Image (spheres, rainbow, N blue to C red):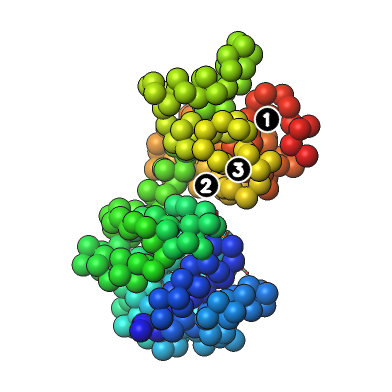
């Protein structure tokens, strides 16, 4: 049994903390939301009254927070002040590379081991304990990080030094955003050309256009394996979340001097879709905007 402090028990963190409790670890949990905290307690976690109380005797501290500002705040003011120096600190939030590197530097200066370990896989994978983790940490720390993440993971990959996990996450999600838009454009064009969607699906999945967005997460309802498209685009990876990740890619590219014109186009298109009031819909619903059938989404 490991003493784990879990901070941030929202859509993702709630299921992740529950899996640590299910694995018989002692999970001291905290969230600003009383509802989220109650849900974690019902799943076997122990409620802490503050971040400080949760981390005070932790062997592992896991955070799953909305964005970089939250992570900087919680680490700077609380975790690095109140956790024992022996604690392994793991941030699983998706945040900007700069914040991840800054927090890693502060943690190291204070004598802690720290890893950024953002995840791929949504709420269902968080609940099922089948997330993919991409980890930025010192090579010597990776085995301990992998072991700590095991109850929540399907696969854990060492991306490189601190910050590399976040770099991998935003590159992967930018690629996903672009490939989904390409997939949607291709299906929209196929439709205009009188090509049946299921025929095009069969051909594209066996041809060089094949990619995850076509074969596993097809944006057309009733085509291919079951996806959010079959559920009115509810319950998948929200457009607002994709937009957040595309903005992180833009910021990172601007700082690094990288040219990502397709990423910029993807951000603009998802911003337009989000601005039409569809931020809560699965990101594959952007198909309906490209088809000129937004009204069918309400
Ligand atoms: P969420 O908003 O549901 O949960 C975040 C939780 O953090 C909330 O419950 C909030 O009350 C809590 N919180 C905020 N500030 C806090 C503080 N100072 N102390 C304690 N708790 C605090 O978000 P989510 O969907 O769980 O996403 C969390 C992270 O995971 C984000 O960075 C997101 O980008 C990433 N992510 C989400 C998904 C997804 O499908 N939802 C998939 C992959 C990665």
Q: Identify the residue position indicated by label 2 in the image.
A: 245
> How many C-alpha atoms fall within 10 Å of the one at disc 2: few (<14), some, or many (≥20)?
many
The reply to whether discs 1 and 3 touch (Cβ–Cβ < 8 Å) is no
User: Would you say 270 lies left or right of 128 here?
Assistant: right
User: Would you say 159 lies left or right of 185 here?
Assistant: left
Classify the position of ligand 1 by quadrant: top left, top right, bottom left or bottom right: bottom right
The N terminus sits in image quarter: bottom left
- For the residue pair 135 and 260, the one nearer the viewer reads as 135
Residue 153 higher or lower than 229, as above or below: below
**Ligand 1 lies under 8 Å from the Cβ of mark 3:** no
The C terminus sits in image quarter: top right
> How many C-alpha atoms fall within 10 Å of the one at disc 3: few (<14), some, or many (≥20)?
many
- Total marks shown come to 3
Front label number (3 vs 2): 3
Q: Earlier in the sequence, mark 3 or mark 2?
A: 3
C-alpha separation, residue under disc 1 versus residue under disc 2: 21 Å
Q: Identify the residue position indicated by label 3 in the image.
A: 228
Tag of residue 288: 1
Residue 114 visible to an observer of this rendering = no
> How many C-alpha atoms fall within 10 Å of the one at disc 1: few (<14), some, or many (≥20)?
some
Give me the residue at 62% from left, 38% from top: 229
Residue 114: give x, y in percent of width and height: 35, 69
Front label number (1 vs 3): 3
Residue 91: give x, y in percent of width and height: 43, 66
Tag of residue 10: none
């Amino acid at each position: 049994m490991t003493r784990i402090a879990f901070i941030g028990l929202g859509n993702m963190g709630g299921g992740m903390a529950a899996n640590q409790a299910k694995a018989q670890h002692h999970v001291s949990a905290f969230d600003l939301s009383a509802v989220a905290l109650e849900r974690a307690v019902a799943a076997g976690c122990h409620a802490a009254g503050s971040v400080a109380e949760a981390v005070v005797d932790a062997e592992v501290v896991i955070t799953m927070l909305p964005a970089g500002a939250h992570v900087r705040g919680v680490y700077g003011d609380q975790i690095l002040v109140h956790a024992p120096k022996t604690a392994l600190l793991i941030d699983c939030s998706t945040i900007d590379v700069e914040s991840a590197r800054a927090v890693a530097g502060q943690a190291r200066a204070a004598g802690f081991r720290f890893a950024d370990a953002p995840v791929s896989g949504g709420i269902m994978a968080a609940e099922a304990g089948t997330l993919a983790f991409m980890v930025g940490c010192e090579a010597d720390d990776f085995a301990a990080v992998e072991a700590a993440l095991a109850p929540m993971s399907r696969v854990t990959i060492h991306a490189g030094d601190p910050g590399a996990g976040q770099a991998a996450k935003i590159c992967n999600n930018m690629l996903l955003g672009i490939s989904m838009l390409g997939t949607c454009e291709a299906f929209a064009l196929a439709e205009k050309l009188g090509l049946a969607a299921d025929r095009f699906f069969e051909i594209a999945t066996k041809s060089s256009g094949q990619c995850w967005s076509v074969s596993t997460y097809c944006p057309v309802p009733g085509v291919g394996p079951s996806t959010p498209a079959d559920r009115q685009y509810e319950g998948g990876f929200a457009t607002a979340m994709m937009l957040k990740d595309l903005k992180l890619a833009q910021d990172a590219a601007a700082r690094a001097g990288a040219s990502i014109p397709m990423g910029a186009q993807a951000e603009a298109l998802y911003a337009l879709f989000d601005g039409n009031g569809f931020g809560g819909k699965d990101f594959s619903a952007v198909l309906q905007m490209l088809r000129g059938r937004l009204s069918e989404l309400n």
